[in-house]
Structures are given as C-alpha cells and as structure tokens.
Image (cartoon, grey):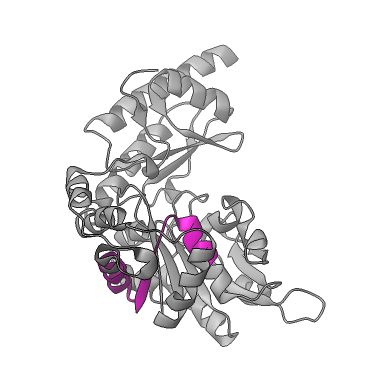
Amino acid sequence: MCATAIDLRSDTVTRPTDAMRRAMATAEVGDDVYAEDPTVARLEALVAERAGFEAGLFVPSGTMGNQVALAVHAQRGSEVIVPEAAHVYEYELGAMAVIAGLVPRFVPAPGGVPRPDDVRAAVTRSIHVAPSGVVVLENTHNRAGGTVVPLDVARAIGDIARAEGLPYHLDGARAWNAAAALGVPLAEVCAPFDSASLCLSKGLGAPVGSVLVGSRAFVGRAHRYRKMLGGGMRQVGVLAAAGIVAVETMVERLTQDHARARRLAEGLARLPGVTIDLARVQTNMVYAHVGDATVFSDALRADGVLVNAIGSASVRFVTHADLREGDVERALAAVERVASALAAVRA
C-alpha cells in the first residue's frame, strides 16, 4: 500500500485541526462529573442552542448518546420503532436489549426514508405483544447511502409519535450533513424530535464525542444513565474544546464534502463493473456495487485507496475534511485500474 493512502473508509478518520489542538491545549477544565467543567458547559449550551433544545449532555460517542436516550424514553420490555438497517440496531451491538431491555420493531425505509403510514401501523397496544415505547429516526441514513430524510416526512412521523404518546428520538450522527444538504439550519432538522444525539467526530472533524440534546428534564435523567454506562468524565474540557471549534468552524464546509462525493460518484458510475445509484448520493457517502467487495477493497488498498466493504458485494466511500486537492481524481484512477484488472481476470 502507498505510504500516503487516500482514506475513504469513513469521516471518522479525520484528525483534529490546528485550531482544535490549540483549544485543547489551553482549555479551562474542571471535574465534569461534579458539573464543574466550564468548557463542557459551553459546548453543551452551544450545541443545544444550534439544535433548538433546552439543554445538552456531552457523551463519549454517538452510540452512548442513542442508548442513553432510549433508556430515558422507554420502559423496559417495550419496543423501539426503528427504520430497517438503522445504526441504532445494526452497529450498536444489541445495546438496546442489553442496556435498556428494549426490542426493535422495524419499519421499511426505502432509500433510508420510512413511510409515515408504516410507522403508524407499527405502533402496538395489544396485550399479546411488547408495547411501543419510542420512535427513532436516523438522518442521514448511513446504510441507505447517506440519504436525507425530507423535513415533511420527519414532521409527519413526529405528529404520529405525539398522537400516540410516544417520544421521538433522532440519531443525528450526521444531522449536520442533512441540514447542509437541505440548506436549512440544524434546528429545523431537529425540530420534530424530543431528543437528538449529534456527533462531533464525523463531518465536523473533532477527535471524539457527541452531544445528546433535549429538554432540561430529559437531560437531567440522561445524566444518570451516562454515569451508569461509564460516561462520566473528569477534566474532559480538553475534548469539549475541540468540539466547540468543530461546531464553530467546520459546519459551513460540509457542502464541500458533498460536492466531492458527487464528483466521485459520477466518475465511478462511468467505470465498467461498478454500479452506482446516483439518486442516493445526497451527502458525503457513495455506495458502489462491485461484485466481490472483499476482493475489490483489498485490491484498492494495495493501490493506496482505503474503503469499507459493506456486505458481500458493495463498498462505501466517504468524503471528509482531511482529503487533499486531487484525492478524488487519484481515487477514481485507482478504482479504474482495479476494476479493469478484475474484469480481465473474469474474462
């Protein structure tokens, strides 16, 4: 593999900017378990304000943010109404069952977008089945290709949740990307929800952390679950400082990632043996059907491009802030070489 590989596996591979490192080095800190870290308090207030909520809670990861929210919202033994292939189920190791005692009820989500009528039909009250406890939406939807849930759909599902007396949680790991794609403030994306887990370490490039936002009462309860899960951190202002810089300086540039993903997708779509659904390239992800995903990703790695194999036949490319000028074109050239070589082997 080349010494300077082009890493397109995820937007989590970004490194802190110089401004983040300076802020971390000079951060004012205190013991956050005692609510004495002023930098954490600033971050929580900043993200809550941007998202349109009363309060925020800094957590080490989006997974913890989601699981704390589920534990607060729903009684043990109830169901989580969740879109198929959602991160909260696919990539959180059964945590909803292990931690909160909850089980999923999936609704179809073509292109990552659930139909409100399917959500309504999923609500259960029968004595014979687990009752509905909480509704979850993921925006953007990772496994669907980084697709954006339209605002009217998110609102309609929220209306159903409220009518049924169910809390409504947003897995907003890439909600900032959704807002950028829609051309609206983050608060508009978050408005239909009772809570949201918002990641700082993906498109925004912070080294670690998410902020769980909601009402003051919700965040008060969430504090206890965060502590229970080992998320109470001490002088963690050194991390929160990077998060503040991320929120204040990295949001506006997300459209650059989206433009690079579109350019990458259009180039990939012209290559033999590579199939792209361009309609799903809406933010910073590109899913490509390539035949044997493991063989393809291994060959790309040998040519200096890192991607993730997704299932047996697809690979995922994710654009991010650490890409250099020309990396998209270099990646396309590598994919073309690999696709041509594999086609020759099959011939």
Residue placed at 23% from the left, 50% from the top? 24
Is residue 165 shown above or below 221? Answer: below
Residue 293 lies in quadrant: top right
Looking at the rendered structure, the number of numbered marks drawn on it comes to 0
State left or right for residue 134 relative to residue 197. right
Which of 166 and 262 lies nearest the eye of the viewer? 166
State left or right for residue 170 relative to residue 345. left
Q: Is residue 185 visible?
A: no
- Secondary structure character of the magenta stretch overall: helix
Magenta-colored stretch includes residue 58: yes
Residue placed at 38% from the left, 52% from the top? 282
Residue placed at 41% from the left, 48% from the top? 281
Q: Is residue 191 visible?
A: yes
Picture coordinates of residue 283, whole percent (x, y): 37, 51
Picture coordinates of residue 14, whole percent (x, y): 32, 41
State left or right for residue 256 relative to residue 141. left
Residue 266 lies in quadrant: top left
Which region of the structure is painted magenta? Answer: 42-68
Picture coordinates of residue 13, whole percent (x, y): 37, 39
Is residue 205 shown above or below 59? Answer: above
Which of 253 and 237 lies nearest the eye of the viewer? 237
Is residue 345 shown above or below 280? Answer: above
Residue placed at 58% from the left, 85% from the top? 165
State left or right for residue 266 relative to residue 22. right
Instruction: Assign the N terminus to one quadrant of the image.
Output: top left
Picture coordinates of residue 112, whole percent (x, y): 52, 57
Instruction: Assign the C terminus to one quadrant of the image.
Output: top right
Q: Residue furthest right?
A: 128
Which of 67 and 301 lies nearest the eye of the viewer? 67
Magenta-colored stretch includes residue 172: no
